[in-house]
Image: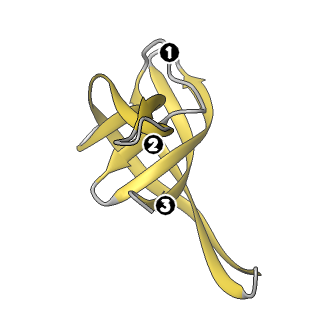
Amino acid sequence: MRLDKRVMLQAKSEARDRLNKKIDAWVNVGSGELWASVKDISGRQFVAAGGTQNQVQTEIVIRRRAGVLPSMRILHGVFAYDIEAVLERDRQWLVLMCKKGVANA
């Protein structure tokens, strides 16, 4: 397995804005940085809400670690990958099936 990309693991956390209103924020898990393999495996285009939408399914492989949940996300460059499933492979790898999006979108 070739882990040649630096990615950031993040979890959703509750924070407060300047008006003390509760907002959802993404925070790094631990140091956050991990080595990973990132590979787009499928894509599709569809029409929804009067416009064309694209969806890309991505497989991200990291070394096995405890506490990785489908409610988390991975950042890589300008892309944010929402984790949809966490699969274990050979007791040493985690395969994260993700939906690719744009960070801060």
Residue 6 located left or right of residue 81: left
Position of 20 with respect to 97 (left or right) is: left
- Determine whether 59 is above or below 104 in the image: above
Q: Residue under label 2, please give it.
A: 60
**Which residue is pictured at 76% across the width and 80% down the height?**
49
Quadrant assignment, res 9: top left
Amino acid type of disc 2?
A: Ile
- Marks 2 and 1: which is nearer the front? 1
The image shows residue 37, relative to residue 14, as above or below, that is below
Ranked by sequence position, the earlier of labels 2 and 3 is 2
| Mark closer to the chain start, 2 or 1 | 2
Question: Distance of mark 2 from mark 3, alpha carbons?
Answer: 14 Å
Q: Which mark is residue 101?
A: 3
- In the rendered image, which residue does mark 1 sit on? 67
Q: Is residue 40 above or below residue 4?
A: below
Q: Amino acid at mark 3?
A: Gly
Q: Which mark is residue 44?
A: none
Quadrant position of residue 19: top left
Q: Earlier in the sequence, mark 1 or mark 3?
A: 1
Residues 16 and 35: in front is 16
Q: Position of residue 1 (x, y in %)?
A: 36, 35
In three-dimensional space, the C-alpha distance between marks 1 and 3, rounded to whole angstroms, equals 23 Å
